[in-house]
Image (spheres, rainbow, N blue to C red):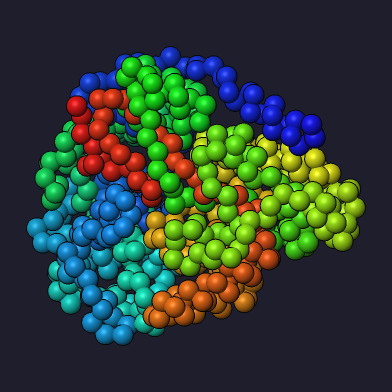
């Protein structure tokens, strides 16, 4: 058995029989639904971050103009009743009447205008800028009409295919950024009762919700980073829904007296980004290509995730507009990896020392995947130091482009269109991008404003070919999301990883 296979086998064995242990847990309130993600929400500011674990909490408090259907196939009106292009560069939205924020402020077009302009304000430094950066200006001709005037004709309407939560303009202007980050005011189905960081966030049903009272009156989000402890909390009744179920618990939970398993093919792609903006061996394309050939992604999928993922050779999953089926993954080829490393000046990997950063508890198996990658790269002769960190600090470092030479990140693209991934993660001016290629920037920009779908797809094909060959990432896989719930909870997972408590019922 090779060293690489030995490392993976040892990792798999260690994962197959972990103790379901952790701190003692109390029985759940029978009238409350408790939801457990791997990490706590980092902020309740709905316009700042772009992290699923944050938006899953914010989505209970705030609404968007439209929402994806549970299967992702259609857009369902929310605060906007309809939308249409009324001129080559003008999208007009008709807004829902009679909606109020939970403090009684009426929802109007002024709130939509303020929200988009706030995101676009450079001083605010929002991570959501790519969702609305095709907008040149926002017009509010009357309280229930809003118009987005785009820089050029766009194939996708702004602020809807890439949704944004709508903020209370009056409340925000009165209280300021810091206050609203912990005291949210939305039009959603729930209001904040309390938030104790890294312990519990509690929500109560909003009696003024425009959609009528939700079936679940009280919700608690309780973060638990360690997978076995999440499982224990579910089995003992301390929580009703857990995310990122380690695959080795699936059979146990599926056959449990009071538990069940649920899964969905995710829109999330996991990858390791090379920080090409910082000096180091990762700036050499031969090194980046070599490391892609040095890793064995199917072996990691099998050992760490029980086969519950789909290998990729590009940043876009196959069910997305723009996906190029001709781009095969970098299949494991040790000889090719060594040849490329030698050509780059590192024969047998000698002299090549790298640090791989990864979060712990944010993605399913994130720590174990990082360790497996480190082991495979070590087997190729590359010295790799794997460092894992808690999520909030880790994510803030990615936004400062402070992690180098390589770091793990996941991207959940809820638009089913390549633009969201490319313009958010792989163009040089994106907040979290650590890759710069003028040819990619030019092609992505052209695709964003191309109305002909055939021509737009051809532009994406050119972009993805460049990205595949330039290898700014270690291309890993698309997740299959694994959830488990108590049997008293009626709920089905969505491919966009969204958790909406209005879609839940108690038996």
Q: Is residue 387 above or below residue 411?
A: above
Task: Decide which of 262, 488 is in the foreground and name it.
Answer: 262
Q: Quadrant of the C terminus?
A: top left
Asked if residue 384 can be seen in this view, the reply is: no
Identify the residue at the far left of this view: 98
Q: Is residue 5 left or right of residue 396?
A: right
At a point 14% along the width and 54% down the height, the residue shown is: 100
Horizontal and vertical percent for residue 121? 41, 67
Q: Nearer the viewer, residue 31 or 16?
A: 16
Quadrant showing the N terminus: top right
When asked about the image quadrant of residue 344, the answer is: bottom right
Q: Residue 318's spot in the image, x, y percent?
A: 49, 58
Q: Is residue 350 above or below residue 255?
A: below
Residue under the point 40% across and 38% down: 263
| Residue 257 found in image quarter | top left
Q: Residue furthest bottom?
A: 88
**Residue at the image position 73 percent from the left and 32 percent from the top:** 7
Residue 446, percent from left and from top = 49, 79
- Front-lying residue, 349 or 207: 349
Q: Give left or right: position of 464 versus 139.
A: right
Residue visible at 64% across and 64% down in the picture: 468
Q: Position of residue 113 (x, y in %)?
A: 27, 68
Q: Is residue 374 left or right of residue 503?
A: right
């Amino acid at each position: 058995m090779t060293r690489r296979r030995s490392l993976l086998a040892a990792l798999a064995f260690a994962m197959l029989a972990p103790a379901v242990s952790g701190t003692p847990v109390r029985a759940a309130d029978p009238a409350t639904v408790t939801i457990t993600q791997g990490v706590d929400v980092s902020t309740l500011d709905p316009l700042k971050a772009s992290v699923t674990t944050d938006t899953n909490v914010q989505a209970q408090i705030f609404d968007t103009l439209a929402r994806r259907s549970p299967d992702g196939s259609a857009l369902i009106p929310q605060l906007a009743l309809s939308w249409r292009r009324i001129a080559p560069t003008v999208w007009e939205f008709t807004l829902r009447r009679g909606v109020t924020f939970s403090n009684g402020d009426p929802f109007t077009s002024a709130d939509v205008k303020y929200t988009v302009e706030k995101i676009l304000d450079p001083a605010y430094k929002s991570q959501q800028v790519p969702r609305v950066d095709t907008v040149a200006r926002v017009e509010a001709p009357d309280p229930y009409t809003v118009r987005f005037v785009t820089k050029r004709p766009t194939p996708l309407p702004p602020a809807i295919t890439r949704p944004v939560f709508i903020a209370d303009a009056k409340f925000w202007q009165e209280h300021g950024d810091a206050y609203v980050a912990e005291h949210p005011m939305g039009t959603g189905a729930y209001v904040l009762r309390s938030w104790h960081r890294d312990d519990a966030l509690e929500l109560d049903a909003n009696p003024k919700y425009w959609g009528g009272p939700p079936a679940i009156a009280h919700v608690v989000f309780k973060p638990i980073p360690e997978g076995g402890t999440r499982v224990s909390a579910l089995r003992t009744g301390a929580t009703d829904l857990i995310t990122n179920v380690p695959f080795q618990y699936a059979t146990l939970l599926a056959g449990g007296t009071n538990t069940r398993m649920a899964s969905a093919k995710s829109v999330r792609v996991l990858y390791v980004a090379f920080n090409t903006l910082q000096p180091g061996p990762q700036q050499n394309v031969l090194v980046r290509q070599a490391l892609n050939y040095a890793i064995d992604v199917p072996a990691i999928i099998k050992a760490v995730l029980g086969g519950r993922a789909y290998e990729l050779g590009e940043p876009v999953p196959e069910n997305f507009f723009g996906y190029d089926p001709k781009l095969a993954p970098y299949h494991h080829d040790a000889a090719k990896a060594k040849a490329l490393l030698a050509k780059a000046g590192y024969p047998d990997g000698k002299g090549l020392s790298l640090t791989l950063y990864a979060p712990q508890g944010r993605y399913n198996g994130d720590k174990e995947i990082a360790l497996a990658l480190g082991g495979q790269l070590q087997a190729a002769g590359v010295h790799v130091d794997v460092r894992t960190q808690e999520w909030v600090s880790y994510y803030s470092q990615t936004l400062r482009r402070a992690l180098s030479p390589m770091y793990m990140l996941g991207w959940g693209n809820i638009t089913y269109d390549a633009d969201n991934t490319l313009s958010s993660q792989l163009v040089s001016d994106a907040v979290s991008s650590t890759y710069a290629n003028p040819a990619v920037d030019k092609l992505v920009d052209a695709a964003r404003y191309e109305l002909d779908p055939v021509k737009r797809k051809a532009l994406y094909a050119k972009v993805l070919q460049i990205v595949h060959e330039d290898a700014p990432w270690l291309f890993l896989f698309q997740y299959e999301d694994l959830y488990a719930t108590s049997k008293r909870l009626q709920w089905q997972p969505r491919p966009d990883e969204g958790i909406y408590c209005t879609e839940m019922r108690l038996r």
